[in-house]
Amino acid sequence: MSMYYYRGIDMEERDLIVCEECGSTEIQTQAWVDANTHQYIGETGIDRDDNWCNECEAHNYFCTKTEFVERMEAWWGDADFPAMERVTGYRQDDFSPEEGYQDFVDACNEWWKAKSYDEKRAIFKEQKSEE
């Protein structure tokens, strides 16, 4: 692991471009290439129709990996108790009701924190599709 680490991603990967919908790096964008030299000139534009996500099998916008991680973390931070139970498999009633079930929240947050980027991405994608 890199010594520079932020919410599950190496700092060297923070500006990696991913699919805005699913966070996959399996993405493509159209580009201008010199027909004679085959030299890359640049992207065709920022229109989502110029982008493709192999995982979603759709034209989607892209964002940085950091932006996607921040979206996943915000979603997790806004999760209510039923969502935390559904995702983690923990049961709120198995924890002390003292301090508003803070032990339950802490256990769920530790569970989430231990997940890798790809594990979080799979959970996020599944839960978002059910909303």
Image: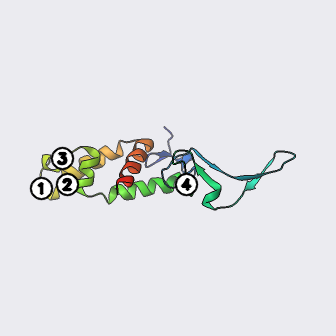
CA–CA distance in space, label 2 to label 3: 13 Å
The quadrant of the picture occupied by the C terminus is bottom left
Q: In the rendered image, which residue does mark 4 sit on? A: 64
Mark closest to the chain's N terminus, 4 or 3: 4
Mark closest to the chain's N terminus, 4 or 1: 4
Image marks 4 and 2: residues in contact by CB distance under 8 Å: no
Mark closest to the chain's N terminus, 4 or 2: 4
Q: In the rendered image, which residue does mark 3 sit on? A: 91
CA–CA distance in space, label 2 to label 1: 7 Å
Q: Around disc 4, counting alpha carbons within 10 Å, would you say few (fewer than 14), some (14 to 19), or many (20 or more)? A: some
**Marks 1, 3: nearer the viewer:** 3
Which residue reaches farthest right? Answer: 36
As drawn, the label of residue 87 is: none
**Marks 2, 3: nearer the viewer:** 3
| Rendered image quadrant of residue 54 | top right
Question: Residue sitting at 43 percent across and 49 percent down?
Answer: 7
CA–CA distance in space, label 4 to label 3: 34 Å
Locate residue 87, reporting x and y percent. Answer: 29, 47
75 or 29: nearer the viewer:
29
Q: In the rendered image, which residue does mark 1 sit on? A: 98
